[in-house]
Each structure stands twice: as C-alpha cells, then as structure tokens.
Image: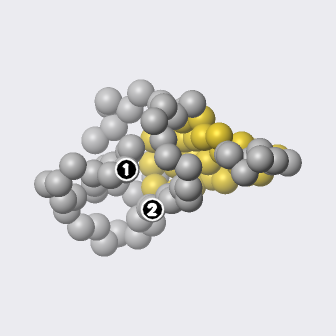
C-alpha cells in the first residue's frame, strides 16, 4: 500500500506516439517518470478492483498498481511497481 498518500483522484499520464518532449529538471510529482519510451496500458476491472499495467513497446512491464474501491469512499491503492533498472 502507498504510505503517506493523500486521498483523492489518481491520475495516469502516458505518451503513445512518437513525439516526445524532454523531462523537466524539477523533482517530479509522480512516482514513476520516464522519457524517450513508448508505452501501452492494460486496464482491467473485476468488481470493485481496478488493475493497471503500463508496458513498454516491447512488452516489458514498467509500472503497475491495483486500486480497490471501498464502500466508505476511502479507496486503497497498492503499488506493484516492478524493478526496472534495466529499462532505459
């Protein structure tokens, strides 16, 4: 589970095309940031659970999480970020 995460909307931003811009030198506000890579996403829903995966164009898993909706409106996000040191 994400420690210290604030309640609110979770955003996913991704580039699917060839045109890419350089990353800002500022510290990113996102947990995962990458440049010069193309991604596609796989999103599935089973009841109150959403599963998200971002993969590189060659199919390597880059990012993933599970979002569980609860009846008290306090949703839970579980990061399942893979080790991606070898992804450039």
Closest to the observer, 56 or 58: 56
The answer to whether 33 appears left or right of 10 in the picture is: left
Q: Quadrant of residue 25?
A: bottom left
The residue identified by callout 1 is 30
| Circle 2/circle 1 CB separation < 8 Å | yes
Name the spot of residue 31 as percent of width and height, x first. 39, 44
In the displayed structure, 51 sits above or below 25; it is above
Quarter that holds the C terminus: top left
Quarter that holds the N terminus: top right
Closest to the observer, 13 or 67: 67
In the displayed structure, 13 sits above or below 74; it is below
At mark 1, the secondary structure is: loop
Name the spot of residue 5 as percent of width and height, x first. 48, 41
The residue identified by callout 2 is 13
| Residue situated furthest front in the rendering | 72
Q: Residue at x 41, y 65 (%)?
A: 15
């Amino acid at each position: 589970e994400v420690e210290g995460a604030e309640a609110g909307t979770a955003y996913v931003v991704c580039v699917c095309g060839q045109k890419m811009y350089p990353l800002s030198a500022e510290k990113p506000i996102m947990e995962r940031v990458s440049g010069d890579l193309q991604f596609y996403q796989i999103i599935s829903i089973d009841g109150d659970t959403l599963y998200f995966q971002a993969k590189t164009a060659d199919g390597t898993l880059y990012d993933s999480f599970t979002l569980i909706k609860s009846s008290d409106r306090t949703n839970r996000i579980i990061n399942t970020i893979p080790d991606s040191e070898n992804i450039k």
